[in-house]
Amino acid sequence: MEICRTITACRAAAAGFRATGARVGLVTTMGALHAGHMALIEAAKAGSDRVVATIFVNPTQFGDPADLDAYPRREADDLAKLKAAGVDAVFIPEASEIYPEGDETIVETTRLAGLYHGAVRPGHFRGVATVVARLFNIVQADAAWFGEKDYQQLAVIRRMVRDLHFPIEINGVPTVREPDGLALSSRNARLAPEDRAAAPVLHRALLAADAAAKQGATAEALDRIIRDTLAAEPRAVLAGLDIVEPEGFARATGPLTGPVAIMLSATFGDILLLDQKEIRP
Ligand code: PAF
């Protein structure tokens, strides 16, 4: 596995793969890799000939500097996992490589970035779109894989790729969960034990909404069921709950006439966790 710390080295590695006619797959990460990331790598390996992974804790998508500082960094462990998974090259740049001095260019999906989770974390999706656009431009992969857990992030990336005509295929990968239903996230390791025990309430709330939808519940009824489920868990503080149509992200109202996506986030202590489920009536 090639380890590239500069854009020049990463471009050379990816160009070398392309020169052999290989289809190049990309998985972008912020490190602290868990089984959810490894599912992305597995999907990328199945869908391409060569896989490039990136590890970059992107400062521009964090609103709170303390959150950025606290983000886990486990380079040696991450590299070992990527190598064992058969990744061909990994790009681990410094922030100054991605954001050169005097940097002033941003990428923003102007509508989607401000909606829902974007309203809870202003600037977050601008940071995500900006870094992902730069990574796409550096690696020039044929396809990239992203987790569906970060549902709005995936929508932002799809929209950016469409609007900016990036020649890359975007694939979503289903959320990987702990046996008790908690969606895997690098943030889970930072939960206090009591919060870790409480956190599966997010998944329980989504399952309750799914069951109600199958019985004909309206979007408003699903909203109430999720709020009530969260309210019964005193350690969970609801941060965001949005029930949207998967295509345009319009808020769903009234009886469900087709699939909807539920995007849910809550804090446990000072840790914000996200979960998501697409449901069908
Ligand atoms: O999902 C993530 O880990 C990050 O938001 C991403 C896509 C790697 C951009 O920094």
Image (cartoon, rainbow, N blue to C red):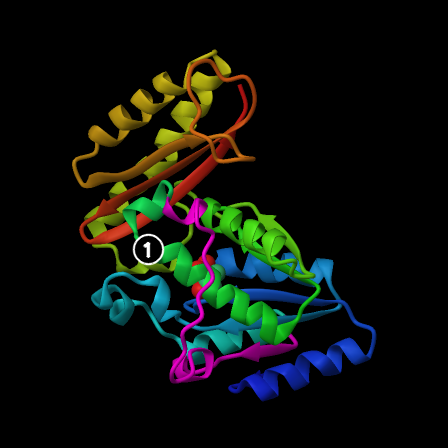
Instruction: Write the residue at 35% across / 18% down.
Output: 220
Residue 135 quadrant: bottom right
Q: Which residues are magenta?
A: 86-114
Rendered position, 147 above or below 73: above
Q: Would residue 139 be found to the left or right of residue 66 on screen?
A: right
Residue 66 quadrant: bottom left
Rendered position, 77 above or below 5: above
Q: Is residue 277 magenta?
A: no
Of residues 146 and 234, the one drawn nearer to the viewer in this rendering: 146
Q: Residues within 10 Å of mark 1 (few under 14, many from 20)?
A: some
Amino acid at pointer 1: Asn
In what quadrant does ligand 1 lie?
bottom left
Q: Position of residue 251 (x, y in %)?
A: 42, 28
Instruction: Write the residue at 67% across / 68% down.
Output: 141
Q: Main secondary structure of the magenta part?
A: loop
Instruction: Write the residue at 65% across / 61% down.
Output: 166
Residue 238 quadrant: top left
Rendered position, 97 above or below 135: below
Q: Would residue 84 be found to the left or right of residue 115 on screen?
A: right
Figure quadrant of the N terminus = bottom right
Q: Position of residue 76 (x, y in %)?
A: 44, 80
Q: Is residue 84 visible?
A: no
**Element assignment for label 1:** helix
Pointer 1 residue: 188
Q: Is residue 220 visible?
A: yes
